[in-house]
Image (tube, rainbow, N blue to C red):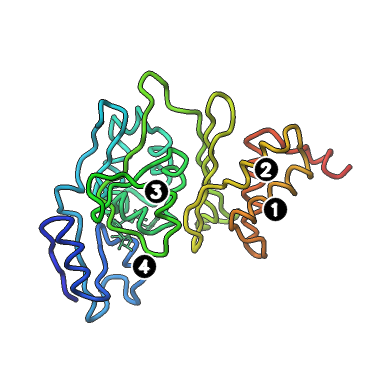
Amino acid sequence: MQLLWPESAAHALALRAAHPGARFVAGGTALQQEWGDRHRAPAGCSLVPLHRLSALQGIELVDGATSLRIGAAMALETVRTHALVREHAPLLAQALAQLGALGVRHLGTLGGNVGWRWGDSTPALLVLDAQAECAHAPGQRLPLAALLAEAELPLIVALHIPLQPGHPPAQTVFEKAAARAAFAPARLRFTLRWSAGQLSHAACAAPDLPARLLVNALAWLQAHPGRRGPAALAGLRQACADDGLPTQQPEDLAHLAARLIAGHCGLLASAIEEVQ
Ligand SMILES: Cc1cc2nc3c(=O)[nH]c(=O)nc-3n(C[C@H](O)[C@H](O)[C@H](O)COP(=O)(O)OP(=O)(O)OC[C@H]3O[C@@H](n4cnc5c(N)ncnc54)[C@H](O)[C@@H]3O)c2cc1C
């Protein structure tokens, strides 16, 4: 294994470009799961460690307190417990509280969680309209939703969560849905956000299903006010399928997401109503 230590984010990009196959690594807790022996990197692999880069550190309010900047190399537990995150982005703190064990949260980073593509933080960041500061585009903020739709993620330097000074954090929900069995891994990471009493954002992620906004599900809800019960479930399931969620068993994630949306919006019929 070869470690290619960068001196800056731009240097990290250059190192990876000069070493085909080299991978960025931060905490290594997700990357190691790809290795046959999880305690040892495969022979011949090249890694570009990011966690010591100063540009990827820090949690602060920027732009006149209209944006919360979180360095990509910040440990998940540091992010979860940080006063600014708890005040301005409680949804993110709530999502991270359900991530792994404390040891994993001390090693794993926010950038690595996003780089993993279906980490717990990603649906939360999506409904918070997060933007990414990237090494290849200094000075710009790129919408995270668009980056996650790309085949390859760029090197993320920091995540920015836009804030509305004077407004309290929006009403939000975070759920990790799993099978009813001990130690069952999460099937779906799922978030909702309301603005002025209206559902404004829905997002989810699952293993092998990169995080995404559920734009079709939201549009369906807006187009069918008052629809509830089985009709709401069927419409939402189709809309979630249009958002790219699988409908095939054993993981009918479109149905699971439809039930979560309908449940949180009070659209589920009682069991008695459903059989009538
Ligand atoms: C026992 C265990 C339990 C876990 N439980 C959970 C869980 O419940 N929920 C969950 O979400 N995750 C879980 N994970 C996965 C993992 O720990 C987290 O996703 C963690 O946030 C990954 O961060 P990292 O810094 O270790 O990433 P790394 O492993 O270093 O990197 C992960 C990926 O992101 C890329 N990457 C890293 N940093 C950046 C960056 N700045 N910009 C762009 N790409 C980058 C890497 O190239 C790699 O592809 C678990 C892992 C273990 C070992």
Tag 1–tag 2 contact (CB < 8 Å): yes
In this rendering, is residue 140 above or below 153? Answer: above
Compared with residue 258, is residue 50 higher up or lower down, i.e. above or below?
A: below
Q: Residue at x 53, y 38 (%)?
A: 201
Instruction: List the residue tagged with mark 2.
Output: 220
Please report the residue visible at 33 percent of the width from the left and 73 percent of the height from the top: 35
Picture disc at residue 143? none
Tell me which numbered mark, 3 or 2, is placed earlier along the sequence. 3
Identified by mark 2, the residue type is Trp
Residue 108, relative to residue 218: is it above or below?
Answer: below
User: Of the residues shown, which amino acid type is indicated by label 4?
Assistant: Gln
Under circle 2, the secondary element is helix
Quarter of the displayed picture in which ligand 1 can be seen: bottom left
Disc 4 on helix, strand or loop?
Answer: helix
Q: Mark 3 highlights which residue?
A: 144
| Cα separation between marks 4 and 3 | 24 Å
Near mark 3 (Cα within 10 A), the count class, few <14, some 14-19 or many ≥20, is many
Inter-mark Cα distance, 3 to 2:
23 Å
**Of label 1 and label 4, which has the lower sequence position?**
4
Please state which amino acid type lies under the numbered disc 3: Leu
Tell me, for residue 238, which label it has, or none.
Answer: 1
Q: Is mark 4 within 8 Å of ligand 1?
A: yes
Report the Cα–Cα distance between label 1 and label 2: 9 Å
Residue at 62% over, 47% down: 216
Quadrant including the N terminus: bottom left
